[in-house]
């Protein structure tokens, strides 16, 4: 005899969901130092799974294939971080001759405030380029500290490759666990959905990587043509920050604009950098990302924006980077069960309206 289904009042269901969200957020905050490396390790494992599978086709032991993938990831990430640190640390050498320039701008501001506000703020006497240089020195030496804060702690940096290795090593075991969780569903269907989900995340990460490379090349060409020093660094930094929607592009343009403002003799250069950056961003938003990344994650803009705010509040920069692929995974998992399909619908794009619009127009025209 089938078990009788328990009917729960709607208000109790809503209350239970709210309590679950509160407990989940509390868990994410308390477990930040462990969960950030866990998520990063998982996404690196998904990214390098094709490489491990390819090596294992040639009878390579799984342990060795996982180690090769781990080594390649460490070299790529370590090289990128070293490149950024080395370039930021060399910035101070370019600020030795800007004292007169900054003082000139301060005098202009003082003259404007005198003539329009009838007050003298004496900025010309308060400007101290040594102070600016000290800020740059401190920031350049704290890049590693920023990286530590991003992943939680020094132990977090160590745990990322450890988690990645074990995720790769036990990927088949994790797939079987998901099949057991959804044992009321067809095992073949569940395995196909998991494989599809893995490919979606892989395509998303690889697509974002391709966009980053193309953006870096475009920025290098533009900044070099304008004669901006450290063009390669500004280009790479802007391309990397582009993975953070909305916020990343703003931070990516801030450094080259300020740098060109302080080191160039004309305001044309910071204005040209800003205009060039905006043009490239338009090309990226309207052509590169739709063509290369496409709709792999299938998340609507509102949920993406809310997720960025929540991820940034809870986990900072790491949260803003991880929230998009994490929500894509959750959307696919929600879609596996009839009870959670409404949440998958809420997170995804509603394409029904787009399909209905032509029909409606045709009917109206008739």
Image: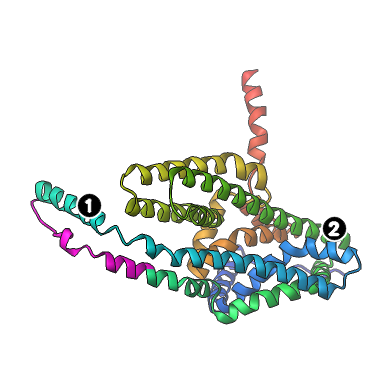
Dot label at residue 105: 1
Q: Where is residue 216 in the image (x, y as percent from the top left)?
A: 56, 50
Q: Where is residue 58 in the image (x, y as percent from the top left)?
A: 90, 64
> Dot 1: what SS?
helix
Q: Which residue lies furthest to the right in this view?
A: 59
The segment highlighted magenta reads 118-136
| Sooner in the amino-acid sequence: mark 1 or mark 2 | 1
Where residue 186 sits, quadrant-wise, is bottom right
Q: Quadrant of the N terminus?
A: bottom right
> Dot 2: what SS?
helix
Magenta span includes 162 = no
State the residue position of label 2: 189
Q: Disc 1 vs disc 2: which is toward the camera?
A: 1
Q: In which quarter of the image is the C terminus?
A: top right
Is 166 drawn above or below residue 79 in the view shown? Answer: below
Is 308 drawn above or below residue 131 in the view shown? Answer: above
Q: Residue furthest left?
A: 118
Please state if 278 lies on the left or on the right of 2 as rendered.
Answer: left
Please state if 184 lies on the left or on the right of 151 as rendered.
Answer: right
Q: Which secondary structure is most common in the magenta stretch?
A: helix
Where residue 285 sits, quadrant-wise, is top right
């Amino acid at each position: 005899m089938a078990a009788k289904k328990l009917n729960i009042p709607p208000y109790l269901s809503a209350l239970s969901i709210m309590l679950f969200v509160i407990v989940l957020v509390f868990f994410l905050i308390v477990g930040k130092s462990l969960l950030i490396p866990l998520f990063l390790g998982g996404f690196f494992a998904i990214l390098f799974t094709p490489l491990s599978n390819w090596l294992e086709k040639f009878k390579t032991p799984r342990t060795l294939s996982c180690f090769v993938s781990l080594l390649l990831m460490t070299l790529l990430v370590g090289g990128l971080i070293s490149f950024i640190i080395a370039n930021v640390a060399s910035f101070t050498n370019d600020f030795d001759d800007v004292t007169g320039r900054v003082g000139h701008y301060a005098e202009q501001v003082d003259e404007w405030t005198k003539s329009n506000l009838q007050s003298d703020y004496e900025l010309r006497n308060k400007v101290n380029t040594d102070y600016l240089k000290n800020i740059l020195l401190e920031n350049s030496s704290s890049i590693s500290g920023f990286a530590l804060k991003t992943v939680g702690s020094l132990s977090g940096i160590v745990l990322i490759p450890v988690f990645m290795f074990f995720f790769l090593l036990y990927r088949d075991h994790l797939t079987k666990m998901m099949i057991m969780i959804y044992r009321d569903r067809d095992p073949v269907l569940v395995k196909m959905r998991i494989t599809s989900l893995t490919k979606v995340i892989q395509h998303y990460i690889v697509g974002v990587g391709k966009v980053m490379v193309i953006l870096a090349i475009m920025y290098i060409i533009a900044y070099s043509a304008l004669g901006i020093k450290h063009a390669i660094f500004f280009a790479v930094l802007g391309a990397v920050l582009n993975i953070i929607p909305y916020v990343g592009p703003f931070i990516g343009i801030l450094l080259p604009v300020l740098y060109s403002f302080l080191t160039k003799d004309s305001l044309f250069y910071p204005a040209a950098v800003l205009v060039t950056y905006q043009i490239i961003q338009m090309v990226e938003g309207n052509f590169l990302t739709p063509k290369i990344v496409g709709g792999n994650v299938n998340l609507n803009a509102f949920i993406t924006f809310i997720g960025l705010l929540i991820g940034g509040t809870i986990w900072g920069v790491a949260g803003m980077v991880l929230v998009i692929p994490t929500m894509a995974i959750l959307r696919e998992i929600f879609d596996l069960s009839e009870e959670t399909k409404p949440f998958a619908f809420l997170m995804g794009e509603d394409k029904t309206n787009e399909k209905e619009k032509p029909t409606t127009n045709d009917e109206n025209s008739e």
